[in-house]
Amino acid sequence: MKGILYAIAFACAIYAGAGDLFAATPVYREYSVTVAQGDTLWSIACRHAEGKEDVRLVMERITKANKLDAGHIYPGQVIKVPMRIQDSGLMLATK
């Protein structure tokens, strides 16, 4: 009985990992956002995170796209925000 449970647990683990292995690499398109008074990199990333996406990953994409040193932004600055493109070609809506 124990062997069957181990086999089922192993099969579940393989099945769960296979989705990540065969998942398509997301495609991103950049669009411009003008930083407003009081905006922070965190607040902009929160507005553009999709679903339960980790905001830190969005911040990292924004930082890399704009080559920001230490993540400093200022009002009036125009920054690029990478948004994931769905299979239909549409960008995901922002919050």
Image (spheres, rainbow, N blue to C red):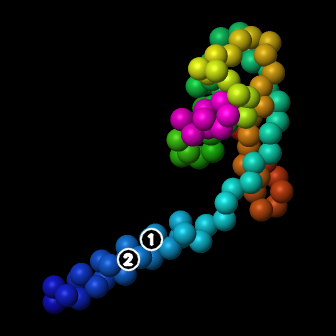
> SS of the residue at dot 2?
helix
Residue 61 locus on image (x, y percent): 65, 38
Query: How many C-alpha atoms fall within 10 Å of the one at disc 2: few (<14), some, or many (≥20)?
Result: few
Instruction: Give the amino acid type for the residue marked by disc 1 in the picture.
Output: Ala
The image position of residue 89, as x and y in percent, is 83, 57
In the picture shown, does residue 71 fall above or below 47? above
Instruction: Return the residue nearer the eye: 84 or 64.
Output: 64
Q: To which quarter of the image does residue 30 belong?
A: top right
Looking at the image, is 44 positioned above or below residue 92? Answer: above
Q: Which residue is mark 2?
A: 12
Q: Residue at x 71, y 12 (%)?
A: 74
Kindly indicate the quadrant of the structure image that contains residue 26: bottom right
Residue 58 belongs to magenta span: yes
Q: Which residue was labeled with disc 1?
A: 16
User: Looking at the image, do the residues carrying marks 1 and 2 touch, with CB atoms under 8 Å apart?
Assistant: yes
Instruction: Look at label 2 and name its amino acid.
Output: Cys
Q: Which residues are magenta?
A: 55-64
For mark 1, give the secondary structure: helix
The kind of secondary structure the magenta stretch mainly shows is helix
* Residue beneath the point at 59% across and 20% down: 70
Is 33 situated above or below 55? above
Q: CA distance from mark 1 to mark 2?
A: 6 Å
Q: Residue furthest left?
A: 2
Q: Residues within 10 Å of mark 1 (few under 14, many from 20)?
A: few
Give residue 31's position: percent from left, percent from top.
82, 36
- Tell me which residue sits at (32%, 79%) in the image: 10
**Image quadrant occupied by the C terminus:** top right
Whether residue 31 appears in magenta in the rendering, the answer is no
The image quadrant of residue 4 is bottom left
Question: Is 71 on the left or on the right of 28, as rendered?
Answer: left
- 13 on left or right of 64: left
